[in-house]
Image (tube, coloured by chain):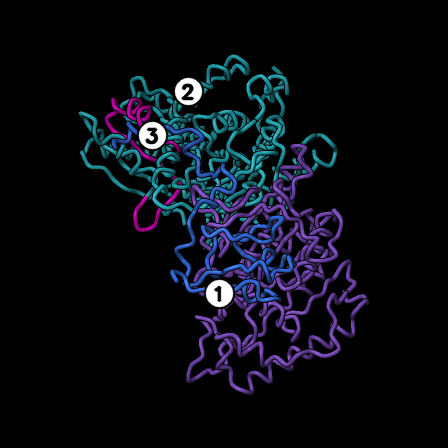
Chain colours: A cyan, B blue, C purple
Amino acid sequence: MKQTLVTGNQAAAWGARLARANYIPNFPITPQTECIETLARWSADGELTGTYFDRMESEHSVMSAAVGAAAVGSRVFTATSSQGLLLMHEVLYIAAGMRLPIVMATISRGLSAPVTLWSDHNDFLDQRDSGWLMFHAENNQEVLDMVLQAYRIAEDPRVLLPAMVNMDGYVLSFTDEPITIPSPEQVEEFLPGYDPAHTIAKNRPVTVGPPVLDEYSIFRAQNHVASRNALDVIEEVQDDFEKIFGRRYHLVDEFMLEDAELVLVTQGSMSTTAKAAILEMRDEGIKVGLLRLRVIRPWPNKAVAVALKDAKAIAVIDRNIAPGKGGIMFPEIIETLYNLDRRPLVSGFVVGLGGNPQTENKVKEITHKLEEDLAAGHPRMEWNDLEEI
Amino acid sequence: MREEEIPYKGIEGIPIIREPGSAAKVNRGSWRLVRPVHHSEKCTKCKICYTYCPDAAIYWTDDGPKINLTSCKGCMICAEECPTGAMTEEKEGA
Amino acid sequence: MQELKSLKDIPEQDYFTGGSSACASCGPSLGLKLALKVLGPETIIINSAGCMTLLPLYPNTPLKASWIHNAIENAASTAAGARHGLDMLGNSDMNVVVYAGDGATYDIGFASLSAAAAKNERIIYICYNNQSYGNTGFQWSTATPYGSETKTTPRGKENPTGNTSVNKDMLKIMGAHRVYAATASLAYPVDFLNKLIRAKERDGFSYIELLGACTAGWNYDPGLTIKISKLAVRCGMWPLYEIEHGMLNLNKDFSELKPIDEFLKMQGRYRALPRDGVERLQALINEHWAKLKEYNKQRYI
């Protein structure tokens, strides 16, 4: 199959183009700019037929415009990062509460203050209570595939929730990787047109987002149930996806877990480096494997528990920090394992903030520290980038 | 209700209102301390009261204005603006 | 749609019912009722958080048109999205209209409004101006006039003036965006509705600012909403004028303005303004009126 060299930004833009999004509001922020610039060029050349490319004056307005267009039945795409993602935070909840299946590519970048341009996962993970579906890609192929799948899952009548597809800034967004770009015909077979029943249309006057009284709990519960429903829908679409595009994904990405005693839990592009390190460590006889989280919301608790239950020790590698508490995914893993008959030892590692590179050697260091923790019967919480500063 | 028992309600579980004008049946008459009374013998059918009612509680007929006492909140704009004194104010419950 | 010649020409069909929780005699509520007469049911009203937000209250709405409530500061951008969404779906004859308060328009939503106007989006932005944040109980906004008391600019021993800031000249600001900008008053419904009819026909952005007389905030007897809306125009507190492509047009000219004293006495928010405050306010009004007269029928921007 023919492969094309594209950056992560371009892969996301291809996803939007192939999905035939008809409204793309946008605002620039490093490292997302190339995504919207690509779409702008296509729009100016007439290659985005039926799509309006709308420059807005802030990310908050971008998501607000997305809500306006989705509320009248449009298929909407946008992209942002870091400060921009945080700026639109209140509107994310509104979009989810209105059950509008907007798809957004988030290009992860560390948060101010102090200012950094490079990647970590705080911006993305801080949106985990918003009600959005959240997917995290490992490479540029997965970015494009996730955008296409996101529309199909989000628009499913059992779900009807907005979805974000995250890629690490710079490492993926500005880096060329060879990927297969599907044909419009293939995408049309996988992703039908969008024709919602809960939005405004001609002869269908609807009040979208009114105030409510006691019913508030009921609507919030529906938001939660819809997100849980997505777990089934995500699995279901994989059959069609594999049949049409020849690639298959799962709720979680299991790498050499069959006999693993030590498991590293990661997400995003650092997983590729970790997998390479694991192959080397396997040659040395270390029984280590990797669990890559690719679906963050809804939380795939059963799939995670099944993947991790036989491990002896787990290192949760958080490329983020919740100051005053610790890594964000650490407690989510612990909670998922809490009711198992045997709880594996779980250590936490905070790494790679502000784009600090996670090399194979660092992954090996983490694995050796986990071995020590297992031998001592005592978990640790460690930051692994501070010695070099 | 256990989490796994919560039924998925589909479109009924989405916070939208699909019935236009559904507020018409809501009784705001209980707000009134005073109410407007129309005297057709003085009425010149100028439509001023009908135009200025903020709650559309005055509706227009061939016989002139009629007052919907379910919607009327008793603000008395109609009585204040009526140029001929055809709309007067009366105490509620009189 | 033909322009209206008199009150009797105002269409009789209403797309607005009673039963809302708006205050009795609410000016903005009346504005919405009147606007919907010319906008019709194939209209989407984009609402900013404010007094009008509670008009629909699940499962009831007084509107026979569509309504989107997003947040407080993003009505204009939500409207831009709705407009283009409709156009892309082949629904270009549905109206997209913002109905937002002055707090949402002058303050927190200003950037959103300015960008939508700068892009000349085909929407009608109606700002109902009760010169405060009304729904939260009457706090100061940059639309609050000099000398008006509000809950966050109360009169006190140290400060008898209440609000010491002069309200933003929003009409000129919107006029500078090279769109259609106009003021309106509920006491002149034919003028208001004709401006709306003109806005509907225009292929671009229109800004109409309606003085939204507010009995609860301004503190006057409810029945006087229209009288106050008329006096505001007659004494120059709320001149009726428009700016289109930079040309200023005074819609209602008077040989002489009424002094503001009668207007101030009618409202609790001004009643205790000391004499020097009243004189300052009168001077501001006279200065503005002189400017309008000077630039009437001329290029202002």
- Point out the frontmost of discs 2 and 3: 2
Q: Secondary structure at mark 1?
A: strand
Q: Quadrant of residue C284?
A: bottom right
Q: Which residues are magenta?
A: A297-326
Locate residue C160, reporting x and y percent: 47, 83
Disc 3 chain ID:
A
- Point out the frontmost of discs 1 and 3: 1
Residue tagged 2: A235
Q: CA–CA distance between discs 1 and 3? A: 79 Å
Q: CA–CA distance between discs 1 and 2? A: 68 Å
- Point out the frontmost of discs 1 and 2: 1
Indicate which disc residue B89 carries.
Answer: 1
Q: Secondary structure at mark 2?
A: helix
Total marks placed = 3
Locate residue B48, reporting x and y percent: 62, 60
Disc 2 chain ID:
A
